Image: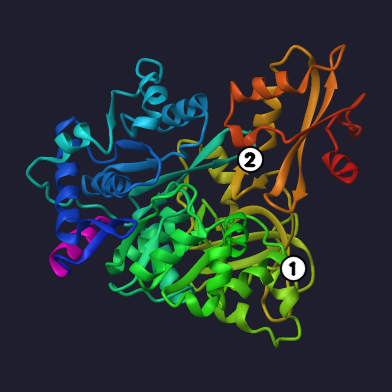
Amino acid sequence: MNLASWVARNGRRLGDRPALAEGARVTATWTGFAARVAGGAAGFRAMGLEPGDRVAIVMANCPAYLEVQHAAWHAGLVAVPVNARLHRDEVAFILANSGTRVVVTDDAHAADVESLLGEVPSLEAVVRAPGPQWDELRARDPLPLADRGRDDPAWLFYTSGTTGRPKGATLTHGNLLMASLSYFADIDPVAATDSVLHAAPLSHGSGLYGLPHVARGAVSVFPTGSPMDGAELLELTRAWPGLSFFAAPIMVKRLAADPALVDAGPSGLAGLKTIIYGGAPMYLADLEDALATFGPRLAQIYGQGETPMTITGLSKADHADTGHPRWRERVQGVGFPRTDVEVRVVDEDDRELPAGEVGEVVVRGGVVMSGYWEQPDASAETLRGGWLHTGDVGSFDDDGFLTLRDRSKDLIISGGMNIYPREVEEALLCHPGVAAVAVVGRPDPEWGEAVVAFVVADGDEPPTDELDRTCLDRIARFKRPKEYRFVASLPTNNYGKVLKRELRELL
């Protein structure tokens, strides 16, 4: 099963129906999209790429992004979508770790990516898209669809790991097929008359939830504003009825307060179908505001890159069931296990715990990754016993409803973006005035969590602007601490491990 077969099929089936759009303007019909994908696949193979080779995508959202991704699959290649907000050195690590041979990037990121030629051993070429280079590459006779099996890698989804270095969750064609079918089963049916809006990064949730819409022939819509505001969203719901989109809670909160949408109210958003949110906690007050603005159009998902955003779900019906005696408690949880997975809560010995008891959330099913790219030890540890160990701690109630209690890992989620403390700590330790540092997250009403660094100075306290610069020279801007606290020492246990729970208590 090659995922690119969806585009080829829709090219034959849907012909002149719109496939890609910017704002209200159609940029490609399904016939045109399918031709660009098959031509791009031929262009990749003409560069010497063979099935299984990796092609990275470092781009802001645009129609060409989907052309590149599906062209890679059409040619039997593995797509490596990279968060375009990452620092140059972080991008370099992902390209080297994945053995990427070709990167497709846009003008805004080309300088950084092109500077990696000669630095990343596997990297052979950089292609700019959209523009003349991509147009030339795809202007070839169409390549026949490559034969891919369910277990063949399709997407390397880079996610933070316990070492602080990102790990490539290997998502196969079968994994992504199962995730798409699960979307139809648990979130929404999709028709060719519907549309999906890509207001969040395609390298993450928006790209994953775009797949079931491509499968059914819905149009993929790209906003023209950055960030998209309420007025534009209102216009898009009128231009493209049946509109759905994925958003981090911070985006939902911002849009719910936008005057254009507040004035329109639920009745003025008839063309809006579903807002899928996830990736960070949604505060109850913010959710109530969102329901007042959008009506019963919200669905929550809980998942990870290792199980492409598919573990549990809180449906639109669950959100709308305000008469349920435990409604407030439920909408602050993460819902019920999805159709295609088994979910358990287990103790330290991986024994299943009864309802009400707190333990680690584990999951298995056809959506779970095949492993981490070229990291067999990490794969064996995370997938031990045939279950994906999420590192999240939670409990089920008697009805089978899951609530997350904490994270066993120290991952910080700010604005829907994953931040692993160790990579921030390692950046700060490069400053000569930092003797020791520990990074934790504190609750933030806007971003979900904010990064706080507890710093032990080596002599005089270094200026915070210098610490900011040290971070910005090494990691992405969104990972930089929002606050620095200088302390005489860090709390540790008898083994010298920093007790981050004590630091969180100080916040």
Local crowd size for mark 1, using a 10 Å CA cut-off: few (<14), some (14–19), many (≥20): some
Q: Measured from the top left, where is residue 85 in percent x and y?
A: 50, 36
Examine the image and state in which quarter residue 295 appears: bottom right
Mark 1: amino acid = Leu
Q: Which residues are magenta?
A: 1-13
- Magenta residue check for 12: yes
- Rounded to the nearest whole Å, what is the CA distance between mark 1 and mark 2? 30 Å
Residue drawn at the location 40% of the way across and 30% of the way down: 109
- Of tags 1 and 2, the one toward the viewer is 2
Please provide percent x and percent y for residue 54.
33, 36
Total count of labels: 2
Badge 1 or badge 2: first in the primary sequence = 1
Quadrant for residue 8, please give it.
bottom left
Position of 331 with respect to 270 (left or right) is: right
Label 2: state its secondary structure. strand
Residue at (16% x, 40% y) in the render? 138
Rendering coords of residue 483 (x, y %): 77, 34
Q: Amino acid at mark 2?
A: Ile
The residue lying at 73 percent from left, 36 percent from top is 482
Task: Please tell me whether residue 463 belongs to the stretch shown in magenta.
Answer: no
Q: Is residue 428 above or below residue 323?
A: above
State the quadrant of the N terminus. Answer: bottom left
Instruction: Report if residue 177 is visible in the image.
Output: no
**Quadrant of the rendered image containing residue 411:** top right
Label 1 SS: loop
Which residue is label 1 attached to? 353
Q: Quick check: 254 left or right of 95?
A: right
Q: Is residue 470 visible?
A: yes
Extreme-bottom residue of the structure: 323
Residue to which mark 2 is pinned: 419
Vertical relation: 7 (above or below) 428: below
**Residue 310's mark?**
none
